[in-house]
Image (spheres, grey):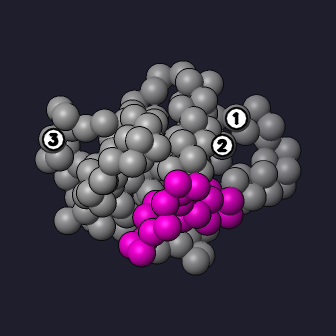
Amino acid sequence: MEENTYSKFNRPKFYKSNIDSLDFENVKSIDLLVEDVEKGEILESTEFFRSYIYELKNILDEDSPKSALESFFKLEHNLDKFYSHLALDENFPDLLTFHRNFSPTVLRIFWEAISLNDNDSLMERVLEAFRIALEEELYLWHENLH
């Protein structure tokens, strides 16, 4: 089967920038930021964006699909907790872009697997689509940070 056959319909064009240029040494995780917000501390939006990018980068660096998915669901839960404490004026990450990018890709994967009667590589291809959508989310918010 050909690689990169997934539809780019309704997907934004991404200009990949150098994520490694960010300094992640003193970046807090989103769950620590949630704790800070619960305590009433003031949070700078750039600090949040850096934490979000750091979390996405860590998910992408996971070796195990199970660990990556657990980290993703933890991030999603922490984002929900974070937003429940704040009324925000700015555009903050909410994983909608991730889901918009991931959904059509996964549908195409299923369609191709059914059409070609190829169920053997289905899990690997879904995981690849997950990583692609995460990378696009990462680059999108990295661009917003700059």
Q: Position of residue 145 (x, y in %)?
A: 25, 62
Residue to which mark 2 is pinned: 126
Quick one: SS at disc 2? helix
Q: Nearer the viewer, residue 69 or 80?
A: 80
Residue to which mark 1 is pinned: 123
Q: Position of residue 113 (x, y in %)?
A: 78, 48
Quick one: SS at disc 3? loop
Image height check: is 86 above or below 34? Answer: below
Q: Nearer the viewer, residue 124 or 98?
A: 98
Residue at (33, 48) in percent of width and height: 41
Q: Position of residue 144 (x, y in %)?
A: 30, 67
User: Residue flagged by tag 3: what amino acid is it?
Assistant: Asp
User: Residue flagged by tag 1: what amino acid is it?
Assistant: Met
In this rendering, the count of numbered labels is 3
Q: Which residues are magenta?
A: 83-104
CB atoms of marks 2 and 1 within 8 Å: yes
Can you say which quadrant of the picture contains the C terminus? bottom left
Residue to which mark 3 is pinned: 23
The answer to whether any part of residue 30 appears in the image is no
Quadrant in the picture for residue 139: bottom left
Image height check: is 46 above or below 127? Answer: below
Q: Is residue 69 left or right of residue 49?
A: right
Quadrant in the picture for residue 7: bottom right
CA distance separating discs 2 and 3: 31 Å
Quick one: SS at disc 1? helix
